[in-house]
Image (cartoon, coloured by chain):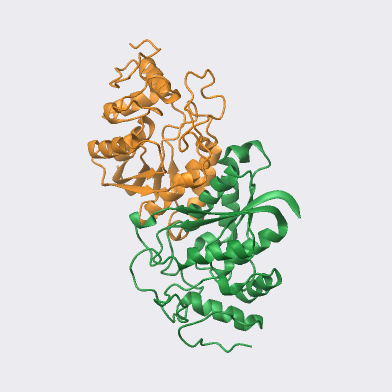
Chain colours: A orange, B green
Amino acid sequence: MSEERAVVLLSGGMDSATAAAWAKARFRWVGALSVDYGQRHRLELEAARAVARQLALAEHRVVGVDLRAFGGSALTDALEVPKGREDIGRLIPITYVPARNSVLLSLLTAYGETRQARHLVIGANALDYSGYPDCRPDFLQAFARVATLGTKAGREGKGFALHAPLLHLTKAGIVRLGHTLGLDFALTFSCYDPTPEGLHCGACDACRLRQRGFADSGLPDPTRYASTPPFERG
Amino acid sequence: MSEERAVVLLSGGMDSATAAAWAKARFRWVGALSVDYGQRHRLELEAARAVARQLALAEHRVVGVDLRAFGGSALTDALEVPKGREDIGRLIPITYVPARNSVLLSLLTAYGETRQARHLVIGANALDYSGYPDCRPDFLQAFARVATLGTKAGREGKGFALHAPLLHLTKAGIVRLGHTLGLDFALTFSCYDPTPEGLHCGACDACRLRQRGFADSGLPDPTRYASTPPFERG
């Protein structure tokens, strides 16, 4: 285990929770940052809190950024969330938030600098979410340079390292990795359009990717869905 | 004048106001973004509003980001602001905000993307503020790449261009440029430690740089300072 410190972006979804579990297994001190960027529901933030507790992270901070001030996405606007699209992963999704990972990683860099943590961890994934330009390897590499050049800590020390341990995993691979690291996936939350009771809808893109991931992994899916999942589970 | 659109970071200080005036002279449509990152006083935001009005910018948006959640700087904490230091521009100042320009430029990128504006304008200055790592040319160049790679607009279009028109100007050069462009500097606000009435203190680093800039420019300083400026004015 490294004696250095890490900070991880923790949205409360299964990817960021797995990234947090990966960081916890690797670094002596891990702090988690959740960014409340004006989501329509707060279930993700509650999930993030629960995951940080389960993984016994050193701390969990929540920073608010109100991206609704300029709108432009279904995740932050009151637009309808698309369901059952056949082009998952091919097109840039309507749930795209402008420059989201730039904003999130900048805040993570600021948080890391204040905690003497030079390792930045993000659960970005190049396969399932290839529709998001800011999950791609060239973007992440470019951002690591920004973090190093844009901070006192980066200039004076060894520089920031950006880790994306899920980048080349399938959703099933993420499920297996999280399972191996002892992550309780029942605490994580993926749905773009939950029921009033806080259940996963079972029909939006995020639910479908989640279901498919568990099905393909051969591991049980602990999620309670409002509607029947379209995939057979093992 | 370019038919393309630009967005500019407008803090309300003399540098960002001059950058906004530069953008207004160059682009058909200019939107300004102010970021309220939990400053101790709101005089800067009021100044930004007044400057946006004076320059007749197309719009002015304010986004809140609460960096106080992790602290670490005199600009956002309740620490004492240093006065009369002899090392302006040599050391990284105590008023340094972690990763500030990364956070600000990410938000500007998001704003620009929603407005179909591919020109990002920032009043960063390499001379007077060389203590800030995120005002240096290599950082700005690295960020332009992040903006282009991290957005749908950047990937699909011509990419973002990052302009820092004040980068190699002295403070006196900035005063002269703003004056030429018709900017009313009386509307701008620089002080880290204003009086309860909202006057510039005349003693903090920012006031001293401001005073020196007007003195060296040979142009009149319209600022009302609470204490006598240490520089002779022409």
Q: Position of residue A10 (x, y in %)?
A: 35, 39
Residue toward you, B169 or B68: B68
Point 49% across, 26% down: residue: A127
Residue toward you, A91 or B228: B228
Q: Quadrant location of residue B94?
A: bottom left
Kindly give the residue lying farthest to the right in the view shown. B1
Residue B199 vertical placement versus B105 (above, below): below
Point 39% across, 16% down: residue: A216
Residue A104 in view of the camera: yes
Point 31% across, 25% down: residue: A199
Residue B167 in view of the camera: no
Numbered-mark total: 0
Q: Quadrant of the C terminus of chain A?
A: top left
Residue toward you, B2 or B171: B2
Q: Position of residue A152 (x, y in %)?
A: 45, 61
Residue B101 vertical placement versus A123 (above, below): below
Q: Position of residue A109 (x, y in %)?
A: 42, 51
Q: Position of residue A223 (x, y in %)?
A: 30, 22
Point 51% across, 80% down: residue: B208
Residue toward you, A134 or B57: B57
Q: Quadrant of the N terminus of chain A?
A: top left
